[in-house]
Every structure is written in C-alpha cells, then in structure tokens.
Amino acid sequence: MAGIALKPGLRVLITAGASGIGRAIADLLIDNGARVHVCDVAEQHLADFSAAYPGHGASLCDVSDEEAVARLFEEVKAGLGGLDALINNAGIAGPTGGVEEIAPADWRRTIDVCLTGQFLCTHHGVPLLKQAGDGAIINLSSAAGRYGYAYRTPYSAAKWGVIGFTQSLAKELGPSGIRVNAILPGIIRGPRMEAVIRDRAAQVGVPYQAMEKQYLDRISLRRMTGPEDVAAMVLFLLSPAGINISGQSLGVDGNVESL
C-alpha cells in the first residue's frame, strides 16, 4: 500500500510560502524531506523563512507580475535544478462590498493575484514538471469556489476560476504524468480571516461576534480549519498515496455548507 512519505529530495515551489497556509505547507514538506523554494511579497516573512531554513530558497515575487514570475523561475532552476511540484497558494482576500461599490481596479487586482498568478506560475512551471517526468500541481481555491459569496464577488469569481483552471489542466497534463488538483480551504483561523469577518460584519451592520457565529454555524463541524490541516492534504497529494488523484476539488473545511 502506498504510504504518506515523500520521494526523497522532492523539489517544490510554494507561492506565498513564507507565512500563513503557505508557510505551514513549507514547514511540513521540509520536515518530510522536501527541497523547498518559496516566494512572497513580504520581505520580513521571507527573511524569517530564510533564517529558519537557510538551505532552502526564497524569492521576492508578486505572482501577478509577468517579469517577476519569469525571474522567480530562473531562481528556482538555479536553486533546485528542476521542479517536481508547484503549489499555487498565493492569493488576496480582495474587497468587501456590494458589486456597485467595488472599484474596477480592486476587481482586477483580485483576479490578477488569485487567478492570473496561478496561470503565470503554471505557464513557467509546466516545462520543468514535464522534464521531471512525474509532477504535481496543487492550486489553492476556496469554499468560495464552490458557493456564491455575497459582498466578496471578486474573490469568489477568482476561486471559481481556479476550479475550471484545475480541471482543464488535469485533462491537458495527465498524459504527461502530471497530477493537478485543487484544495478548497474553508474558514482558516488567523488574522486574515478575522479581517474578513470584521469587514463582512461592518458591511451588513452586525457585531463581530455575531458574524463569527454565522460563519461557524455554516460549518458542519462548527470549528475553523487550521493551516496545518491544509498542509496535511498537500503532503498526502504529493506522496505516493496520492499518485492516482487528479482533477479533484478537495475541501479541507469541516464541511462548509454555505457562505
């Protein structure tokens, strides 16, 4: 039976990998023997990562910037010598507001980071994954990629797009031995989710605690998910145990029933 253990020295790029979910993924993969390169837009988080893992790579990169992504992959090739897995984790929460209130620039920025950024990294990553002969791509979507999300239309639209991108890539790249899956986190505990709940509470005019309870009441397990839970799913998918899993949208969310 296939085990949950990585191929020794698995070469992995994690976007937005220096903090939050990305850092949890990096920590777990490194603990399991992977060679990791992360990129991020936050210099302090990158410095913290490099201090913790001086033997692994770190690049400053905005994934929505074509030139920056091209430079990133040159650094990945120089540091790792190739690529076995790409984790498209970078994303932003985007604006909270009615569709008539959202600035077109904020819409474009959300789509650019959450969806176009995944395309750009995949565009550059696939040739390296094909050279490796057996690769994996994991795209971070969201429970918002499964349900409509009032007052968060840019984010939800981008995350629905990630699902279509994932399923199309799975068909396209399967013959090359590349597995492509999406992970759909739910309500992830931490400061980013706190900000989302606070903004949503202000939008509809209720106290923070009441809005937080509304979110939790829509989760069957009535609890938030931790970044480490998402990391565990990544580890599974990259291990031999996930060798025949592709084209899937996998919720790690305690069963979010609606948004």
Image (cartoon, rainbow, N blue to C red):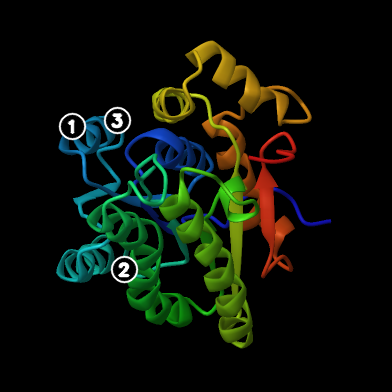
Q: Residue at x 55, y 41 (%)?
A: 231
Q: Residue at x 20, y 64 (%)?
A: 65
Hey, what amino acid is under mark 1? Gln
Hey, what amino acid is under mark 3? Ala
The CA distance from mark 3 to mark 1 is 12 Å
Q: Which residue is mark 3?
A: 52
Determine whether 39 is above or below 27 in the image: below
Q: Which residue is mark 1?
A: 44
Relative image position of residue 242 (x, y in whole percent): 70, 59
Which is more foreground, mark 3 or mark 1? 1
Determine whether 81 is above or below 153 in the image: below
Which is more foreground, mark 2 or mark 1? 1
Q: Which residue is mark 2?
A: 81
Indicate which disc, 3 or 1, sits on the residue closer to the N terminus: 1
Q: Circle 3: is it few (<14), some (14-19), or many (20+) Cα within 10 Å?
A: few
Q: Is residue 169 visible?
A: yes
Relative image position of residue 81 (x, y in whole percent): 31, 68
Hey, what amino acid is under mark 2? Gly
Quarter holding the N terminus? bottom right
Determine whether 170 is above or below 253 in the image: below
Indicate which disc, 2 or 3, sits on the residue closer to the N terminus: 3
Left or right: 38 in relation to 74 = right
Q: Is residue 234 visible?
A: no
Closer-to-camera residue (213/133): 213
